[in-house]
Image (tube, coloured by chain):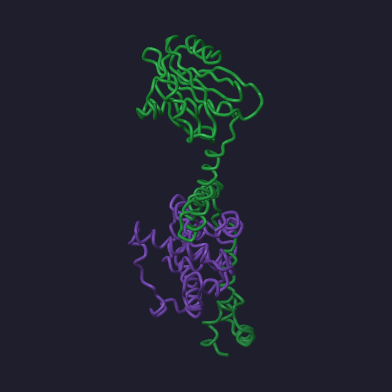
Chain colours: A green, B purple
Amino acid sequence: MNCEDAKPLIDSFADGELDLVNHVQVEAHLDECLACDHTYRNTTALKNALAGEELYFKAPVELRTRIRSSLHEAAEESFWRGLLKWRWMPTMAAAAIAVITLFSALTIFRPSANPEDQLTNEMVSAHVRSLMLDHDTDVISTDQHTVKPWFEGKLDFSPPVVDLAPQGFSLIGGRLDYLGGRPVAALVYQRRQHLINVFIYPAQDKHNESGASTRHGFNIIHWTKNGMTFWAVSDLNAGELQGFTQLLQNS
Amino acid sequence: MNRSEFEEVFLPHLDAAYNLARWLTRDPTDADDVVQESFMRAFRFFNGFHGGDSRAWLLKIVRNTCYTWLRKNRPSEIVYELDEDRHESVTGDPEAVLQENIDKQFLRKLLDKLPPAHREIIVLRDLEGLSYKEISSVTDLPLGTVMSRLARARKRLQSDASATQTGVLG
Protein backbone atom coordinates (compact mmCIF):
# COMPACT_ATOMS: atom_id res chain seq x y z
CA MET A 1 0.00 0.00 0.00
CA ASN A 2 1.36 3.42 -0.98
CA CYS A 3 0.63 6.85 0.54
CA GLU A 4 -2.07 7.67 -2.00
CA ASP A 5 -4.03 4.55 -1.05
CA ALA A 6 -3.36 4.90 2.65
CA LYS A 7 -4.18 8.58 3.22
CA PRO A 8 -7.97 8.36 2.73
CA LEU A 9 -8.05 5.38 5.09
CA ILE A 10 -6.11 6.85 7.99
CA ASP A 11 -9.13 8.31 9.79
CA SER A 12 -11.07 5.06 9.44
CA PHE A 13 -8.01 3.20 10.64
CA ALA A 14 -7.78 5.44 13.69
CA ASP A 15 -11.49 4.88 14.31
CA GLY A 16 -11.11 1.11 14.00
CA GLU A 17 -13.68 1.09 11.23
CA LEU A 18 -11.62 -0.64 8.54
CA ASP A 19 -12.11 -4.21 7.46
CA LEU A 20 -9.34 -6.56 8.53
CA VAL A 21 -7.48 -6.65 5.19
CA ASN A 22 -7.30 -2.86 4.86
CA HIS A 23 -6.50 -2.47 8.53
CA VAL A 24 -3.48 -4.73 8.29
CA GLN A 25 -2.28 -3.01 5.13
CA VAL A 26 -2.60 0.51 6.56
CA GLU A 27 -0.86 -0.60 9.72
CA ALA A 28 2.03 -1.96 7.66
CA HIS A 29 2.24 1.27 5.69
CA LEU A 30 2.34 3.43 8.85
CA ASP A 31 5.30 1.39 10.05
CA GLU A 32 7.32 2.39 7.07
CA CYS A 33 5.96 5.85 6.16
CA LEU A 34 6.84 8.69 8.54
CA ALA A 35 4.52 11.27 6.89
CA CYS A 36 1.46 9.03 7.09
CA ASP A 37 2.31 8.01 10.62
CA HIS A 38 2.50 11.70 11.44
CA THR A 39 -0.98 12.22 10.04
CA TYR A 40 -2.21 9.26 11.97
CA ARG A 41 -0.80 10.57 15.24
CA ASN A 42 -2.33 13.97 14.58
CA THR A 43 -5.71 12.36 14.02
CA THR A 44 -5.44 10.32 17.18
CA ALA A 45 -4.39 13.37 19.18
CA LEU A 46 -7.36 15.33 17.89
CA LYS A 47 -9.71 12.45 18.59
CA ASN A 48 -8.47 12.19 22.15
CA ALA A 49 -8.72 15.93 22.69
CA LEU A 50 -12.31 15.93 21.45
CA ALA A 51 -13.33 12.89 23.45
CA GLY A 52 -12.83 14.55 26.81
CA GLU A 53 -15.72 15.56 29.04
CA GLU A 54 -14.90 19.24 28.56
CA LEU A 55 -16.55 19.49 25.16
CA TYR A 56 -19.56 17.35 25.95
CA PHE A 57 -22.74 19.19 26.91
CA LYS A 58 -24.73 17.30 29.48
CA ALA A 59 -28.46 17.94 29.61
CA PRO A 60 -29.53 20.26 32.44
CA VAL A 61 -31.50 18.54 35.19
CA GLU A 62 -34.47 20.88 34.63
CA LEU A 63 -34.71 19.73 31.03
CA ARG A 64 -35.21 16.16 32.15
CA THR A 65 -37.97 17.27 34.52
CA ARG A 66 -39.57 19.39 31.81
CA ILE A 67 -39.56 16.56 29.29
CA ARG A 68 -40.98 14.08 31.77
CA SER A 69 -43.88 16.33 32.64
CA SER A 70 -44.55 17.04 28.95
CA LEU A 71 -44.53 13.31 28.26
CA HIS A 72 -46.97 12.83 31.10
CA GLU A 73 -49.35 15.37 29.61
CA ALA A 74 -48.95 13.94 26.12
CA ALA A 75 -49.63 10.43 27.39
CA GLU A 76 -52.87 11.49 29.06
CA GLU A 77 -53.97 13.38 25.99
CA SER A 78 -53.22 10.46 23.72
CA PHE A 79 -55.05 8.15 26.11
CA TRP A 80 -58.26 10.12 25.62
CA ARG A 81 -57.66 10.49 21.91
CA GLY A 82 -57.03 6.78 21.73
CA LEU A 83 -60.37 6.12 23.34
CA LEU A 84 -62.06 8.09 20.59
CA LYS A 85 -60.41 6.17 17.79
CA TRP A 86 -62.72 4.18 15.58
CA ARG A 87 -61.27 0.87 16.57
CA TRP A 88 -62.56 1.54 20.06
CA MET A 89 -66.06 2.31 18.88
CA PRO A 90 -67.50 -1.19 19.45
CA THR A 91 -66.01 -1.22 22.93
CA MET A 92 -67.30 2.28 23.61
CA ALA A 93 -70.76 1.36 22.35
CA ALA A 94 -70.82 -1.76 24.48
CA ALA A 95 -69.69 0.24 27.50
CA ALA A 96 -72.36 2.88 26.86
CA ILE A 97 -75.05 0.23 26.58
CA ALA A 98 -73.86 -1.38 29.77
CA VAL A 99 -74.00 1.95 31.61
CA ILE A 100 -77.45 2.77 30.27
CA THR A 101 -78.72 -0.69 31.16
CA LEU A 102 -77.31 -0.40 34.64
CA PHE A 103 -78.91 3.00 35.19
CA SER A 104 -82.24 1.81 33.83
CA ALA A 105 -82.10 -1.20 36.08
CA LEU A 106 -81.32 1.00 39.05
CA THR A 107 -84.19 3.29 38.18
CA ILE A 108 -86.77 0.63 37.44
CA PHE A 109 -85.80 -1.93 40.01
CA ARG A 110 -84.49 0.46 42.59
CA PRO A 111 -85.15 -1.30 45.82
CA SER A 112 -87.39 0.88 47.93
CA ALA A 113 -86.38 1.32 51.51
CA ASN A 114 -90.01 0.86 52.39
CA PRO A 115 -92.63 -0.79 50.14
CA GLU A 116 -95.34 1.18 51.91
CA ASP A 117 -93.57 4.43 50.93
CA GLN A 118 -93.65 3.34 47.35
CA LEU A 119 -97.32 2.43 47.54
CA THR A 120 -98.09 5.77 49.19
CA ASN A 121 -96.35 7.56 46.33
CA GLU A 122 -98.40 5.59 43.87
CA MET A 123 -101.62 6.54 45.64
CA VAL A 124 -100.70 10.22 45.56
CA SER A 125 -99.75 9.97 41.90
CA ALA A 126 -103.06 8.31 41.07
CA HIS A 127 -104.92 11.01 42.98
CA VAL A 128 -103.06 13.81 41.17
CA ARG A 129 -103.53 12.06 37.83
CA SER A 130 -107.27 11.87 38.38
CA LEU A 131 -107.38 15.62 38.96
CA MET A 132 -105.07 16.50 36.06
CA LEU A 133 -106.78 14.42 33.45
CA ASP A 134 -110.21 15.60 34.54
CA HIS A 135 -110.96 11.92 34.75
CA ASP A 136 -111.93 11.43 38.29
CA THR A 137 -114.91 9.25 37.61
CA ASP A 138 -116.01 6.63 35.12
CA VAL A 139 -119.42 6.36 36.65
CA ILE A 140 -120.93 9.57 37.85
CA SER A 141 -123.48 9.09 40.48
CA THR A 142 -124.25 10.26 43.93
CA ASP A 143 -126.13 7.04 44.44
CA GLN A 144 -124.18 4.29 46.08
CA HIS A 145 -126.57 1.78 44.54
CA THR A 146 -125.55 2.89 41.09
CA VAL A 147 -121.84 3.03 41.80
CA LYS A 148 -121.45 -0.33 43.51
CA PRO A 149 -123.00 -2.43 40.71
CA TRP A 150 -120.90 -0.57 38.15
CA PHE A 151 -117.77 -2.25 39.52
CA GLU A 152 -119.30 -5.69 39.08
CA GLY A 153 -117.72 -7.54 36.22
CA LYS A 154 -114.90 -5.06 36.17
CA LEU A 155 -113.17 -6.23 39.34
CA ASP A 156 -112.70 -9.57 41.05
CA PHE A 157 -113.92 -8.08 44.28
CA SER A 158 -116.81 -5.91 45.38
CA PRO A 159 -115.78 -2.68 47.09
CA PRO A 160 -118.02 -1.30 49.81
CA VAL A 161 -119.63 1.89 48.63
CA VAL A 162 -121.30 4.24 51.09
CA ASP A 163 -122.63 7.71 50.65
CA LEU A 164 -121.66 10.19 53.34
CA ALA A 165 -123.47 13.18 51.93
CA PRO A 166 -125.38 13.78 55.15
CA GLN A 167 -122.06 14.09 56.97
CA GLY A 168 -120.75 16.54 54.37
CA PHE A 169 -118.85 14.12 52.13
CA SER A 170 -120.84 13.54 48.98
CA LEU A 171 -120.11 10.62 46.72
CA ILE A 172 -119.41 11.81 43.20
CA GLY A 173 -118.71 8.58 41.46
CA GLY A 174 -116.23 5.80 40.90
CA ARG A 175 -113.69 4.58 38.42
CA LEU A 176 -111.15 1.86 37.86
CA ASP A 177 -107.48 2.39 38.45
CA TYR A 178 -104.41 0.24 38.46
CA LEU A 179 -102.15 0.52 41.48
CA GLY A 180 -99.58 -1.60 43.26
CA GLY A 181 -99.67 -4.07 40.42
CA ARG A 182 -103.42 -4.73 40.50
CA PRO A 183 -106.75 -3.21 39.47
CA VAL A 184 -108.34 -1.22 42.23
CA ALA A 185 -111.63 0.51 42.80
CA ALA A 186 -111.49 4.25 43.22
CA LEU A 187 -114.34 6.10 44.89
CA VAL A 188 -114.47 9.84 44.63
CA TYR A 189 -115.96 11.99 47.37
CA GLN A 190 -116.22 15.73 47.58
CA ARG A 191 -115.94 18.03 50.60
CA ARG A 192 -116.52 21.64 49.56
CA GLN A 193 -114.00 22.12 46.71
CA HIS A 194 -111.80 19.26 47.83
CA LEU A 195 -111.87 15.88 46.14
CA ILE A 196 -111.09 12.71 48.02
CA ASN A 197 -109.94 9.58 46.28
CA VAL A 198 -110.57 6.36 48.14
CA PHE A 199 -108.70 3.43 46.65
CA ILE A 200 -109.97 0.00 47.64
CA TYR A 201 -108.57 -3.46 46.97
CA PRO A 202 -108.44 -6.79 48.76
CA ALA A 203 -105.86 -6.81 51.56
CA GLN A 204 -102.62 -8.54 50.63
CA ASP A 205 -102.01 -10.00 54.07
CA LYS A 206 -103.78 -10.60 57.28
CA HIS A 207 -102.25 -7.61 59.06
CA ASN A 208 -104.52 -4.75 59.78
CA GLU A 209 -102.13 -2.18 58.53
CA SER A 210 -102.97 1.42 58.97
CA GLY A 211 -101.21 4.75 58.95
CA ALA A 212 -101.29 8.37 58.00
CA SER A 213 -98.78 10.45 56.14
CA THR A 214 -98.30 13.57 54.08
CA ARG A 215 -96.78 13.84 50.62
CA HIS A 216 -96.42 16.98 48.56
CA GLY A 217 -99.20 18.65 50.52
CA PHE A 218 -101.59 15.72 50.23
CA ASN A 219 -102.83 13.83 53.24
CA ILE A 220 -102.92 10.09 52.99
CA ILE A 221 -104.62 7.72 55.38
CA HIS A 222 -104.82 4.01 54.88
CA TRP A 223 -106.39 1.20 56.82
CA THR A 224 -107.63 -2.34 56.42
CA LYS A 225 -111.10 -3.50 57.26
CA ASN A 226 -113.00 -6.68 56.46
CA GLY A 227 -110.22 -7.95 54.19
CA MET A 228 -110.09 -4.73 52.20
CA THR A 229 -107.35 -2.15 52.14
CA PHE A 230 -108.46 1.46 51.89
CA TRP A 231 -106.39 4.46 50.89
CA ALA A 232 -107.86 7.91 51.23
CA VAL A 233 -105.93 10.67 49.48
CA SER A 234 -106.88 14.33 49.45
CA ASP A 235 -105.68 17.88 49.79
CA LEU A 236 -108.32 18.18 52.51
CA ASN A 237 -106.83 19.03 55.87
CA ALA A 238 -105.65 16.10 57.95
CA GLY A 239 -108.29 16.55 60.63
CA GLU A 240 -111.24 16.49 58.27
CA LEU A 241 -109.77 13.62 56.29
CA GLN A 242 -109.31 11.74 59.54
CA GLY A 243 -112.99 12.38 60.34
CA PHE A 244 -113.95 11.19 56.88
CA THR A 245 -112.06 7.93 57.26
CA GLN A 246 -113.65 7.37 60.67
CA LEU A 247 -117.05 7.69 59.08
CA LEU A 248 -116.10 5.22 56.37
CA GLN A 249 -114.74 2.74 58.90
CA ASN A 250 -117.81 2.96 61.06
CA SER A 251 -120.28 2.62 58.26
CA MET B 1 -47.67 3.76 23.32
CA ASN B 2 -46.60 3.27 26.90
CA ARG B 3 -45.03 6.32 28.52
CA SER B 4 -42.93 4.52 31.11
CA GLU B 5 -41.67 2.14 28.43
CA PHE B 6 -40.77 5.11 26.26
CA GLU B 7 -38.97 6.85 29.12
CA GLU B 8 -37.08 3.70 29.94
CA VAL B 9 -35.80 3.38 26.38
CA PHE B 10 -35.16 7.02 25.48
CA LEU B 11 -34.48 9.08 28.59
CA PRO B 12 -31.02 7.48 28.99
CA HIS B 13 -30.13 9.17 25.68
CA LEU B 14 -31.12 12.62 26.90
CA ASP B 15 -27.48 13.72 27.21
CA ALA B 16 -26.69 12.49 23.70
CA ALA B 17 -29.72 14.36 22.37
CA TYR B 18 -28.83 17.52 24.23
CA ASN B 19 -25.17 17.43 23.23
CA LEU B 20 -26.04 17.15 19.54
CA ALA B 21 -28.72 19.85 19.77
CA ARG B 22 -26.42 22.11 21.76
CA TRP B 23 -23.66 21.81 19.17
CA LEU B 24 -26.00 22.31 16.23
CA THR B 25 -27.99 25.25 17.66
CA ARG B 26 -25.01 26.67 19.59
CA ASP B 27 -27.35 28.05 22.22
CA PRO B 28 -28.41 26.46 25.53
CA THR B 29 -32.00 27.75 25.47
CA ASP B 30 -32.55 26.77 21.86
CA ALA B 31 -31.06 23.36 22.57
CA ASP B 32 -33.54 22.91 25.45
CA ASP B 33 -36.46 23.68 23.16
CA VAL B 34 -35.22 21.52 20.31
CA VAL B 35 -34.59 18.54 22.60
CA GLN B 36 -37.97 18.88 24.25
CA GLU B 37 -39.68 19.01 20.88
CA SER B 38 -37.61 16.05 19.69
CA PHE B 39 -38.74 13.94 22.63
CA MET B 40 -42.37 14.84 21.97
CA ARG B 41 -41.95 13.88 18.34
CA ALA B 42 -40.23 10.66 19.28
CA PHE B 43 -43.09 9.87 21.65
CA ARG B 44 -45.64 10.48 18.89
CA PHE B 45 -43.71 8.30 16.44
CA PHE B 46 -42.87 5.70 19.06
CA ASN B 47 -45.01 3.18 17.18
CA GLY B 48 -42.56 3.54 14.29
CA PHE B 49 -39.68 2.38 16.49
CA HIS B 50 -39.34 -1.36 16.19
CA GLY B 51 -36.50 -1.93 18.57
CA GLY B 52 -32.86 -1.69 17.51
CA ASP B 53 -30.58 1.27 18.06
CA SER B 54 -32.71 3.61 20.16
CA ARG B 55 -29.96 6.21 20.48
CA ALA B 56 -29.49 6.49 16.70
CA TRP B 57 -33.29 6.58 16.24
CA LEU B 58 -33.62 9.43 18.73
CA LEU B 59 -30.59 11.33 17.41
CA LYS B 60 -32.01 11.20 13.91
CA ILE B 61 -35.15 12.95 15.17
CA VAL B 62 -33.04 15.46 17.13
CA ARG B 63 -30.95 16.19 14.05
CA ASN B 64 -34.01 16.70 11.85
CA THR B 65 -35.62 18.93 14.48
CA CYS B 66 -32.39 20.95 14.70
CA TYR B 67 -32.24 21.54 10.96
CA THR B 68 -35.92 22.42 10.79
CA TRP B 69 -35.31 24.86 13.62
CA LEU B 70 -32.16 26.32 11.97
CA ARG B 71 -33.91 26.71 8.61
CA LYS B 72 -36.68 28.62 10.33
CA ASN B 73 -34.64 30.75 12.75
CA ARG B 74 -31.13 31.04 11.30
CA PRO B 75 -31.38 30.17 7.63
CA SER B 76 -28.03 31.82 6.88
CA GLU B 77 -26.16 29.25 8.98
CA ILE B 78 -27.02 26.26 6.90
CA VAL B 79 -26.15 27.93 3.63
CA TYR B 80 -22.63 26.68 3.55
CA GLU B 81 -20.28 25.28 1.02
CA LEU B 82 -19.91 21.57 1.39
CA ASP B 83 -16.32 20.97 0.47
CA GLU B 84 -16.80 17.29 -0.30
CA ASP B 85 -16.26 17.97 -3.99
CA ARG B 86 -13.94 20.88 -3.56
CA HIS B 87 -10.32 20.14 -4.11
CA GLU B 88 -8.74 19.84 -0.74
CA SER B 89 -6.76 23.00 -0.10
CA VAL B 90 -4.90 21.60 2.84
CA THR B 91 -2.57 19.23 1.08
CA GLY B 92 0.40 19.14 3.31
CA ASP B 93 0.23 17.42 6.67
CA PRO B 94 0.97 19.54 9.72
CA GLU B 95 4.57 19.11 10.65
CA ALA B 96 4.01 18.65 14.32
CA VAL B 97 1.65 16.47 16.23
CA LEU B 98 -1.37 18.13 17.77
CA GLN B 99 -0.94 18.06 21.49
CA GLU B 100 -3.53 16.21 23.47
CA ASN B 101 -3.37 18.86 26.16
CA ILE B 102 -4.66 21.46 23.70
CA ASP B 103 -6.71 24.16 25.38
CA LYS B 104 -10.26 22.81 25.36
CA GLN B 105 -11.94 26.23 25.24
CA PHE B 106 -9.91 26.97 22.14
CA LEU B 107 -10.85 23.65 20.56
CA ARG B 108 -14.49 24.31 21.39
CA LYS B 109 -14.37 27.62 19.55
CA LEU B 110 -12.84 25.97 16.52
CA LEU B 111 -15.43 23.24 16.45
CA ASP B 112 -18.14 25.85 16.89
CA LYS B 113 -16.95 27.59 13.73
CA LEU B 114 -17.09 24.54 11.50
CA PRO B 115 -20.01 24.33 9.08
CA PRO B 116 -22.87 22.29 10.62
CA ALA B 117 -22.25 19.27 8.38
CA HIS B 118 -18.69 18.98 9.62
CA ARG B 119 -19.50 19.95 13.17
CA GLU B 120 -22.23 17.34 13.52
CA ILE B 121 -20.15 14.49 12.15
CA ILE B 122 -17.33 15.22 14.60
CA VAL B 123 -19.84 15.55 17.45
CA LEU B 124 -21.47 12.24 16.53
CA ARG B 125 -18.19 10.39 16.15
CA ASP B 126 -15.65 11.94 18.50
CA LEU B 127 -17.89 13.32 21.25
CA GLU B 128 -20.73 10.83 21.16
CA GLY B 129 -18.73 7.85 19.91
CA LEU B 130 -21.18 6.56 17.30
CA SER B 131 -19.96 4.02 14.78
CA TYR B 132 -19.86 4.96 11.11
CA LYS B 133 -22.92 2.79 10.57
CA GLU B 134 -24.85 4.58 13.30
CA ILE B 135 -23.81 7.96 11.89
CA SER B 136 -25.02 6.78 8.52
CA SER B 137 -28.44 5.94 9.92
CA VAL B 138 -28.68 9.22 11.88
CA THR B 139 -27.67 11.41 8.94
CA ASP B 140 -29.00 9.30 6.05
CA LEU B 141 -25.57 9.54 4.44
CA PRO B 142 -23.95 6.56 2.68
CA LEU B 143 -21.13 4.93 4.67
CA GLY B 144 -18.52 6.12 2.16
CA THR B 145 -19.65 9.72 2.60
CA VAL B 146 -19.57 9.40 6.38
CA MET B 147 -16.01 8.17 6.11
CA SER B 148 -14.76 10.90 3.76
CA ARG B 149 -16.69 13.72 5.40
CA LEU B 150 -15.35 12.82 8.83
CA ALA B 151 -11.79 12.78 7.49
CA ARG B 152 -12.29 16.20 5.89
CA ALA B 153 -13.90 17.64 9.00
CA ARG B 154 -10.99 16.56 11.15
CA LYS B 155 -8.45 17.80 8.70
CA ARG B 156 -10.18 21.16 8.61
CA LEU B 157 -10.23 21.35 12.37
CA GLN B 158 -6.53 20.53 12.50
CA SER B 159 -5.59 23.09 9.89
CA ASP B 160 -7.79 25.71 11.60
CA ALA B 161 -5.98 24.95 14.81
CA SER B 162 -2.54 25.32 13.30
CA ALA B 163 -3.55 28.44 11.38
CA THR B 164 -5.12 30.19 14.37
CA GLN B 165 -2.73 29.35 17.09
CA THR B 166 0.75 28.21 16.40
CA GLY B 167 1.20 27.48 20.06
CA VAL B 168 -1.22 24.61 19.74
CA LEU B 169 1.20 22.76 17.62
CA GLY B 170 4.07 21.41 19.52
- B51 w.r.t. B108: above or below: below
Instruction: Please name whichever residue, A184 or B48, is drawn nearer the observer in this view of the structure.
Output: A184
Residue occupying the point 51% across, 19% down:
A220
Is residue A244 positioned above or below B80 on the image?
A: above
State the count of labels. 0
In this rendering, the answer to whether A3 lies above or below A105 is: below
Q: Name the foreground residue: A196 vs B27.
A: A196
Please report the residue visible at 41 percent of the width from the left and 15 percent of the height from the top: A170
The quadrant the N terminus of chain A occupies is bottom right
Residue A35: x %, y % from top left: 56, 81
- The x and y percentages for residue A67 are 52, 50
From the top left corner, tell me how far across and down residue A94 is, in percent: 52, 54
Q: Which residue is drawn at 41% across and 24% down?
A: A173
Instruction: Determine the image quadrant of residue A23.
Output: bottom right
Q: Reply above or below: A146 against A24.
A: above
Residue B101 % position (x, y): 59, 61
* Nearest the eye: A132 or B88: A132
- Which residue is outermost to the bottom? A1
Q: Residue at x 62, y 86 (%)?
A: A32
